[in-house]
Image (cartoon, grey):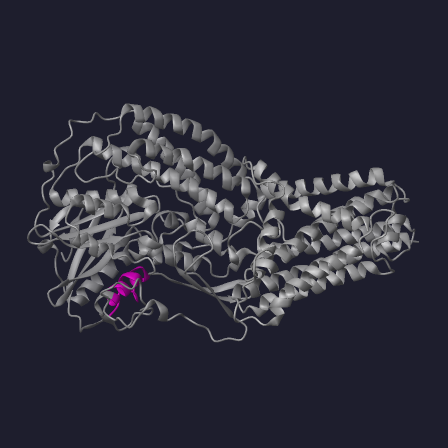
């Protein structure tokens, strides 16, 4: 056995992870992904171990609900053969390792900067001199969009190569939002600071990321969350999903200039986020999830309120969806626009709605269930066409699914035990490795933590679903009209800050 | 002269009514009817910023665009009252003086060197080109039917026709309304509300314009709409007396604004590649009018 098999949210001593030679490491991991479509790489990263770099690769085996972890120690000076040549899903991970540590790959096809961290190996690579792919041609033209955009969105640069109105190639340059979150995780010592930090990894996924952090931390501390804690987290995750999906539907309608949909879905999002305000005092659920405690318990009164909110939400939402999905002018914009094929989606390791829209069943709630998801018997909603329509239709169905989950959950609100004193949460164990997978509304969130000899965080690694899905966006717009780019982009709704960290 | 006064009054309210309709349709109160005019007045008080990459073309284009619309307005008659200018073939003058203005706004957009504006310019040029045959086949048919070649005489002669000429007028209304939507960059061809440069047509061409120049472009846009509205009104009023004609002018303009507002509220914009199909289809409606005219004149033997 050259790898360790663990479960989601399981802590193991770092020393238990088998260390293999790089060539065996390469064969092992690329082989594992290649042999089964149910396996994909959830995280592959490196950290400094003395003078050397330790690489850790986590492959999730979805059908067996397990994660295979293996590691390898490499020298910075070594030139390595790349995983990417065998499996494209490793492409961005290897770029990141190259950027951080200067490890050279002999055959990586696309060794470009990812996010320009402060302590990157090659300081000469700056955001201003990104090596864009270019075509030398009289007929083709380039269109650059951003990093400052017309709407109130995050910064990122998009470079199109077009033949008239048709997009041939899109290259996305990110890194403008880099804040050094992973480094801050090591610098901040108080748990509250860390929890707040995790809420701000991506502002639209505060529940998703803070749950992932809480699970990782609790696992390191050997804390088993009680039922009421798991309950609150599950409810918060599903409420967040409804709110963001409704907002996305509104944004999609805005982009096709369908005013009614835009304003009705926008209005429908409000009562949902306002419910979070009632629950925890913040519409984006900040301050709600804290490791080791049920900070703001979900009470019977809140359950009643939520069921009222859902009862008024559902008829309007159903009616508006009926309008939207029966309107020829809207359907003609959605259908066959921005197609990501099944092959592409699985090759690049797409996750979340993006993967499910292209017929790839990838959902942590099913494959590595946490909190109360094992009880909910989650069935992922999958569409096969991979176009804008599929991704929009998934949102509609997931909202209904989440409403059902919420209704069945709040029918049985668990008693909140006397709040456990915070001391119940011990300090993390020494020399542990843990992985925490959470299905946020956008897709799979992966946090990996490693503790040092004192139980302090030695390395913290975050992978937002956007990390892989940006590539899906770049592929989806090929051969589409450039005027359809905004609607493709909105159908993915990816995070810049989640990618840039 | 009467037509100029009426068109200016209609233009003041037209865009405000569209915006108000859209606001009400989406359950909001919306800005006052005169807000677009207030915006324009604010812009007129402002200075202009020119990009360093632009040349004199960019500076003169808004003025030429504005004056071309004014010139076009002068030839539009109102029922019995002639336009300020009226001569044989003035409808050709009308179309090409507008085209001149458009030509300048297109080269001004190219002048900025922005890739967005170049895209917008190419779209605008393509769509106007497709819309042109529809307008000329329509006006040509009406000229053939009435035996005259100036707006005033064509419209004056039109009302005395049989019932079928009113059917033709209804088709002509459709064509003119659609041309007005295309020329003024409204839905479903273009989305005037969008903030996304990549999907814009007209708005993206004027991204670099500011202050006074932008005010001129906006004003010209408002006038253009009212001018097309006036042409539609002319199809119906013929020589009926002014006390009926003037209220019906405003009623038709109001209806047109409301219907544009409703269209924009309850449908999505076309996919860009469907636009040419849609615009070329207008030409076939014009051809239908042409065959109608041939039938009336009994040219088929």
Q: Nearer the viewer, residue B112 or B35?
A: B35
The total number of labels drawn is: 0
**For the point 30% across and 52% down, which residue is it?**
A464
Can the viewer see residue A318?
Answer: yes
Residue nearest the observer in this picture, B136 or A185: A185
> Magenta stretch: dominant SS?
helix
Quadrant where the image shows the N terminus of chain A = bottom left
State the image coordinates of residue A155 (x, y, percent, origin top left): 39, 57
Q: Judge from the rendering whether residue B152 lies leftward or rightward of residue A220; answer left or right.
A: right
In the depicted view, which residue is nearer to us: A177 or A42? A177
Residue at 9% across, 54% down = A452
Whether residue A431 is in magenta: the answer is no
Horizontal arrangement in the rendering, residue A294 relative to residue B23 (left or right):
left
Q: Is residue A89 magenta?
A: yes
Magenta stretch, residue numbers: A81-99
From the top left corner, tell me how far across and down residue A243 is, in percent: 39, 38
Which image quadrant for residue B247? top right
Task: Give percent across and percent down for residue B127.
Answer: 66, 59
Residue ranking furthest to the front: B45
Residue A353 relative to residue A316: left or right: left
Q: Residue A255: x, y in percent?
A: 51, 49
Q: Quadrant of the C terminus of chain A?
A: bottom left
**Depicted B173 relative to depicted B53: above or below:** above
Q: Is residue A429 left or right of residue A70?
A: left
Res B273 visible? no
């Amino acid at each position: 056995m050259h790898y360790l098999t663990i479960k989601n949210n399981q802590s193991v001593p770092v020393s238990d992870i088998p260390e293999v030679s790089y060539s065996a490491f390469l064969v092992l991991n690329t082989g594992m992904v290649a042999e089964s479509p149910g396996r994909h790489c959830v995280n592959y990263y490196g950290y400094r171990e003395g003078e050397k770099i330790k690489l850790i690769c986590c492959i999730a085996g979805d059908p067996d609900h397990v994660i295979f972890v293996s590691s390898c120690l490499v020298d910075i000076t070594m030139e390595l053969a790349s995983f990417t040549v065998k499996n494209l899903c490793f492409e961005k991970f290897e770029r990141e390792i190259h950027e951080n540590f200067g490890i050279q790959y002999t055959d990586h096809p696309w060794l470009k900067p990812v996010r320009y961290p402060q302590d990157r190996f090659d300081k000469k690579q700056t955001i201003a001199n990104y090596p864009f792919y270019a075509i030398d041609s009289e007929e083709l033209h380039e269109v650059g969009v951003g990093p400052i955009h017309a709407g109130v969105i995050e910064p990122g640069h998009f470079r199109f190569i077009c033949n008239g109105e048709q997009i041939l190639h899109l290259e996305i340059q990110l890194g403008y939002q880099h804040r050094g979150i992973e480094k801050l995780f090591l610098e901040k010592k108080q748990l509250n600071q860390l929890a707040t930090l995790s809420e701000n990894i991506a502002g639209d996924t505060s529940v998703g990321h803070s749950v992932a952090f809480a699970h990782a931390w609790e696992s390191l501390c050997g804390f088993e969350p009680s039922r009421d804690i798991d309950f609150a987290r599950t409810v918060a995750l599903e409420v967040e999903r409804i709110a963001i999906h409704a907002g996305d539907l509104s944004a999609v309608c805005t982009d096709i200039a369908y005013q009614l949909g835009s304003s009705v879905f926008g209005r429908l999002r409000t009562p949902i986020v306002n419910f979070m305000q009632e629950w925890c005092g913040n519409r984006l659920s900040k301050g709600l999830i804290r490791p080791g405690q049920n900070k703001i318990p979900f009470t019977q009164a809140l359950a009643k309120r939520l069921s009222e909110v859902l009862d008024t939400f559902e008829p309007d939402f159903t009616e508006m969806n009926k309008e939207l999905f029966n309107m020829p002018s809207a359907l003609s914009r959605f259908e066959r626009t921005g197609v990501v094929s099944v092959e592409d989606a699985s090759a690049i390791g797409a996750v979340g709605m993006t993967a499910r829209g292209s017929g790839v069943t990838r959902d942590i709630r099913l494959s590595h269930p946490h909190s109360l998801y094992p009880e909910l018997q989650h069935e992922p909603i999958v569409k096969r066409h991979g176009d804008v329509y599929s991704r929009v239709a998934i949102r509609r169905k997931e909202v209904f699914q989440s409403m059902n989950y919420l209704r069945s959950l709040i029918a049985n609100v668990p008693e909140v035990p006397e709040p456990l004193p915070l001391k119940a949460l011990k300090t993390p164990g020494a020399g542990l490795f843990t992985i925490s997978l959470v299905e946020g509304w956008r897709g799979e969130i992966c946090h990996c933590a490693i503790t040092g000899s004192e139980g302090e965080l030695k390395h913290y690694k975050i992978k937002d679903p956007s990390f892989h899905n940006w590539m899906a966006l770049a592929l989806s717009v090929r051969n589409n009209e450039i005027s359809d780019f905004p609607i493709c982009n909105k159908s993915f709704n990816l995070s810049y800050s989640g990618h840039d960290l | 002269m009467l037509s100029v006064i009426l068109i200016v009054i209609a233009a003041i309210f037209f865009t405000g009514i569209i915006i108000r309709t859209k606001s009400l349709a989406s359950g909001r109160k919306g800005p006052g009817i005169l807000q677009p005019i207030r915006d324009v007045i604010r812009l007129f008080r402002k200075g202009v910023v020119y990009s360093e990459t632009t040349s004199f073309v960019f500076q003169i284009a808004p003025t030429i665009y504005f004056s071309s619309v004014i010139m076009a307005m002068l030839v539009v008659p109102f029922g019995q009252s002639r336009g300020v200018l009226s001569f044989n073939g003035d409808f050709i003058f009308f179309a090409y003086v507008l085209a001149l203005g458009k030509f300048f706004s297109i080269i001004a957009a190219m002048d900025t060197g922005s890739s967005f504006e170049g895209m917008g310019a190419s779209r605008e040029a393509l769509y106007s080109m497709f819309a042109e045959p529809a307008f000329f086949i329509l006006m040509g048919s009406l000229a053939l039917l009435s035996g005259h070649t100036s707006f005033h005489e064509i419209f004056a002669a039109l009302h005395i026709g049989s019932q079928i000429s009113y059917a033709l007028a209804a088709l002509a209304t459709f064509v003119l309304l659609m041309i007005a939507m295309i020329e003024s960059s409204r839905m479903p061809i273009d989305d005037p509300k969008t903030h996304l440069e990549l999907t814009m047509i007209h708005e993206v061409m004027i991204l670099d314009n500011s202050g006074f120049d932008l005010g001129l472009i906006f004003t010209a846009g408002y006038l253009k709409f009212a001018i097309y509205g006036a042409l539609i009104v002319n199809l119906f009023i013929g020589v009926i007396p002014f006390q009926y004609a003037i209220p019906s002018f405003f009623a038709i303009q109001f209806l047109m604004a409301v219907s544009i507002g409703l269209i924009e509220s309850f449908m999505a914009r076309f996919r860009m590649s469907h636009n040419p199909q849609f615009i070329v289809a207008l030409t076939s409606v014009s051809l239908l009018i042409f065959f109608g005219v041939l039938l009336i004149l009994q040219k088929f033997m």
